[in-house]
Amino acid sequence: MQNKTAVSSYLLSLGIKPTSKGYRYLSDLINMRLEGKEILPLKYCGYKVVSEKYSASTDCIDKNIQNCISKAWLDGDIEALYGEFGNTIDSDKGKPTAKQFIMQAAEKISAISLHDGF
């Protein structure tokens, strides 16, 4: 339960809105990673589990996650986003890929949780 709260707080701090479909998918994938579940490769592992949970195609999951990340880059706190993901930004797209975003977010949340004693 603490992971879910930490993930939610983290995503909100980056400007990712809970009303976005991609928010639920990102949250689930980050939580799966934090729980030690294998999610890579995303399309065949992580997206498959999420697609079964929400009765959606893996392509739909991918598209909604990409849209969610893009929206954060357009409307979110750019300084916070670059502070968190500066070294993982795809030079062609100007933002991290879904894989980079999920893995970096899980790593950051895990580090915060360890530091705070969760």
Image (spheres, rainbow, N blue to C red):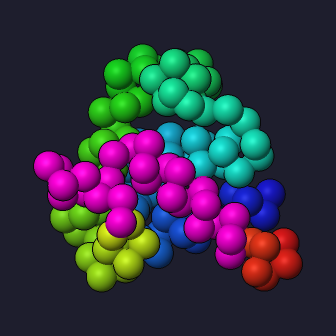
Q: Position of residue 46 (x, y in %)?
A: 57, 29
Vertical side of 85 occupied by 106: above or below:
above
70 lies left or right of 36: left
Query: x and y percent of residue 67 in the render?
Result: 27, 45
At a point 35% along the width and 22% down the height, the residue shown is: 59
Q: Is residue 51 visible?
A: no
Image location (x, y in percent) of residue 60: 36, 25
- Across and down, in percent, residue 14 comes to 41, 71
Quadrant holding the N terminus: bottom right
Whether residue 17 is situated above or below residue 13 in the rendered picture:
above
Question: Does residue 36 appear in this view?
Answer: yes
Tell whether position 109 is magenta.
yes
Magenta region: 87-112
Q: Is residue 111 above or below residue 48?
A: below
Residue 58 colored in magenta in the image: no
Q: For the image shown, how many numbered marks are present on the structure?
A: 0
Tell me if 65 is positioned left or right of 54 in this view: left
- Dominant secondary structure of the residues highlighted in magenta in the image: helix
Look at 48% across and 69% down and name the residue there: 12
Please give the name of the residue rendered at 51% of the width and 58% of the height, measured from the top-left corner.
Answer: 104
Q: Residue furthest right?
A: 117
Give the residue displayed 64% in from the left and 66% down from the top. Answer: 109
Which image quadrant for residue 50?
top right
Which quarter of the rendering shows the C terminus? Answer: bottom right
View extreme (left): residue: 92
**The quadrant where residue 65 appears:** top left
Q: Vertically, is 63 above or below 108?
A: above
Q: Which residue is at the front of the view, 16 or 114?
A: 114
